[in-house]
Amino acid sequence: MMLRRRARLADGWFPQGKPDEQMQEKLELLRSYIKEAGRDPASFGIEARINGSSGAGNPDEWHRLTEGWRALGATHITISTMEWG
């Protein structure tokens, strides 16, 4: 499974998706694999991406998503502005 490989070899992860219950389960599983590999989950970065381009929500939605990722333990947030216009 790719999560196990990430847990063993990577310094972090760029999850694709929204900060929902399914993502929470994936992150909990990833953290368990990190511990299983003898590593500290606190040293493993999680960088979430929020689509900030025109037509993809508004500042209130982006704030809600950011807070959702923060609650899941994201260490970094990227706001994509591709196709901003």
Image: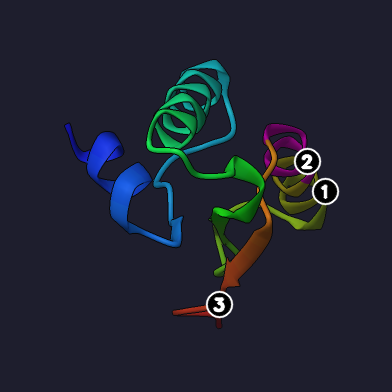
Give me the C-alpha separation between circle 2 and circle 1: 6 Å
| Quadrant position of the N terminus in the picture | top left
Q: Nearer the viewer, residue 72 or 85?
A: 72
Near mark 2 (Cα within 10 A), the count class, few <14, some 14-19 or many ≥20, is few
Q: Secondary structure at mark 2?
A: helix
Q: Which mark is residue 13?
A: none
Q: Position of residue 65 (x, y in %)?
A: 69, 43
| Magenta part of the chain | 67-72
Q: Nearer the viewer, residue 72 or 31?
A: 31
Q: Position of residue 29 (x, y in %)?
A: 43, 22
Near mark 1 (Cα within 10 A), the count class, few <14, some 14-19 or many ≥20, is few
Q: Which residue is mark 1?
A: 60
Left or right, 15 with respect to 69, comes to left
| Mark with earlier residue (3, 1) | 1
| Quadrant position of the C terminus in the picture | bottom right
The residue depicted at 82 percent of the width and 48 percent of the height is 60
Q: Mark 2 and mark 1 in contact? Answer it, CB < 8 Å.
A: yes
Q: Position of residue 33 (x, y in %)?
A: 39, 30
Residue type highlighted by circle 3: Thr
Residue type highlighted by circle 2: Arg
Q: Which residue is mark 2?
A: 64
> Of helix, strand and loop, which mostly describes the magenta segment?
helix
Q: Which mark is residue 81?
A: 3
